[in-house]
Amino acid sequence: MSPYAGYLIDGLRGRLQLDARRAIYLVKVGAQVYVLGVGEGGFTKLGEMPSSDLPSDPHPASPGSFADALARAWKGRKDP
């Protein structure tokens, strides 16, 4: 059985291309949105937030919306 059984993966909610090999993604899984860094070393979880913190429109008119969501996720991040 998959370790993701029982989770509803709703899909990609945002992407910020940092350079040719690095990007940040917002991925909605159930009621959470995970902020993932992707680069040469693979995926790294940078943070998470409730999906209610994102705008309801998946294609917002404001280009700052992704940055705002990322800032909220980073602020709520817990350091190990």
Image (tube, rainbow, N blue to C red):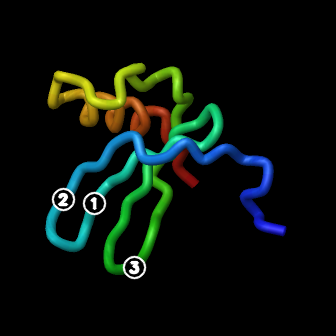
* Tag shown at residue 41: 3
Residue at which label 1 appears: 23
Image depth: mark 3 or mark 1 in front: 1
Rendered location of residue 10, percent (x, y) = 55, 42
Q: Residue at x 28, y 60 (%)?
A: 23
* Nearer-the-camera pick, 13 or 74: 13
Q: Mark 2 packing: few (<14 Cα in 10 Å), some, or many (20+)?
A: few
Pick out the residue farthest to the bottom.
Answer: 40
Please say if 22 is above or below 31.
below
How far is mark 3 from mark 1, CA to CA? Answer: 12 Å
Amino acid at pointer 3: Gly
Q: Quadrant of the C terminus?
A: bottom right
What amino acid is labelled 1 in the image?
Ala
Amino acid type at mark 2: Leu
Given contact means CB atoms under 8 Å apart, are the residues at marks 2 and 1 in contact?
A: yes
Quarter of the rendering containing residue 78: top right
Label drawn at residue 18:
2
Looking at marks 2 and 3 on the same chain, the residue that comes earlier in the sequence is marked by 2
Give the percent coordinates (x, y) of residue 32. 59, 36
